[in-house]
Image (cartoon, grey):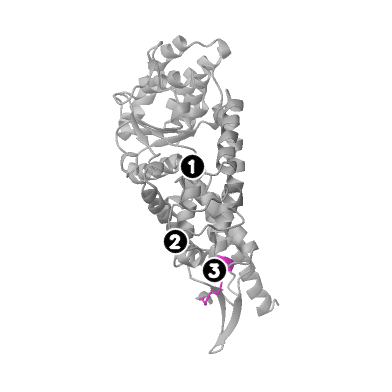
Amino acid sequence: MISEEKCAKDIVELFAEKCKISLPKYETLNNGGENFLAIYTGNRNEFFLNVLSDIGSEMSEDNPFKNSVFLSDHKIENWLLSSEVEYLQTLLSESLTIGRDSLKSNFHKKFIPFVGGEEKRIDSKTNNIIYGRRGSGKSSLILYGCNKIIEHELPFVWIAMQQYQGRKDIQVIPQFLYEMVAECEGYLTNGTSLKLKEIIFEMEKQGLKLTFDEVKVNLPLFSRYFLPFVKSKGAFYLFIDDLHLLGNEIQPLLLSAIYSIARGNNVYLKISAIENLTSLYNYELSEGMQSPGDIQIIRLDYNLLNPERAHKHISEILKSYAQYAGIPSLNKIFDLRTRHRLTWVCAGVPRDALYIFDNSISKAMNENRKKVAITDINMAAADSMTEKEKFLSDDVSDDQQSLRELIEEIKSFCVDVPPTHLEFPYVPIGTFAQADIPTDNPSG
């Protein structure tokens, strides 16, 4: 027979594994002849409670702690060493990559409205293109939009363009249509799906010889079988994530093909892209979509224009994550001045803020601090800059060298050239990681 001590340890180890945290403190108790197992946390959160409930439901009836395991709050001397902060770091890490699989997660529960309330338009019956820098929240907005469409009980498809990255050939269009049909199979009858795939296969047989004129010949046939399904459902939403990854030449042709099916047929396009890498319309060919007539623009790049609003937005995001993890206040892990520094170094970009904050927690823990300090933010930001430079090959494949040279000039200017117009003592950026700069200015 397994001892009560072994049963208790197995339960706590399973709890830690499912929560992705270190083994928490626990204690076995006996009250009135009944055994209890108390697992100590700083502040019970919904996730921990749900995990414990699931574990309880899976226990055998002869387990001495069946229906008698509970979470118990205890005083936390250092929140950075708490189970809640461990879970917070897991949340931060998982949130850095938002994709179609995120629909299965609880990420949307932590969603914070954008500075300009852009989320209010994402489920509207219009076509929209969402422009924003890397990490500005484009995919998060698409995820939010998909969840709103689920609430409306309408059909939708989310297609990420990574697998078409750099492509310029016309075959992108039938392959995209195939993916759209495949994702719709839960809505379509088997006969309709087969008819649509037959039309697509005929285009794919042409290989690289396929022309856009041949695609246009097949689009009315595609619409003939696809649109009755849309009519029966009332509307259909097509979410396209990272359109800019496609070759610039093919983007307007793909949009033109999709729009020929969508226009006037209750099919609504919601697209995300980086603006300077996107071509909505080819004026020579008169193909694509034009703003604002065909598609309306949503821009997420307002944060740089208003630092205080950016700070408020990022603080609200971090507060949402902290509360979800069971941390009662952001002040438990870093103070207001440090949060202002975080907003400054991430230039108002939410994903950069989450990434830098996650790394700064690790750095603070390594230094045995009780709170994240400005030094930790600075060091994490320096690491982030090195990694962000790697994205150049993805975003600017045609002229990487000149852009790298320009970045080096800017870095040299910031690090090596003392600004003579500033009233406070000059400290080179290279020393930020070693020393905090006393200042009453929240922006740094």
Question: Which residue matches tag 2?
Answer: 336
Q: Is residue 401 left or right of residue 190?
A: right
Above or below: residue 123 compared with residue 53: above
Q: Which disc number belongs to residue 282?
A: none
Instruction: Give me the C-alpha separation between circle 1 and circle 2.
Output: 23 Å
Q: Is residue 112 something that shows in the picture?
A: no
Give whichever of 366, 122 is nearer the camera. Answer: 366
Rendered image quadrant of residue 207:
top right
Which residue is outermost to the bottom?
Answer: 32
Which range is magenta?
Answer: 73-83
* Amino acid marked by disc 2: Leu
* Amino acid marked by disc 3: Trp
Question: Which residue matches tag 1?
Answer: 135
SS assignment at label 3: helix
Question: Which residue matches tag 3?
Answer: 79
- Along the polypeptide, which appears first: circle 1 or circle 3? 3
- Along the polypeptide, which appears first: circle 1 or circle 2? 1
- Along the polypeptide, which appears first: circle 2 or circle 3? 3
Viewport quadrant of the N terminus: bottom right
Q: Name the front one of labels 2 and 3.
A: 2
Give whichever of 251, 226 is nearer the camera. Answer: 251
Q: Residue at x 34, y 22 (%)?
A: 290
* x and y, in percent, of residue 38 in the image: 56, 77
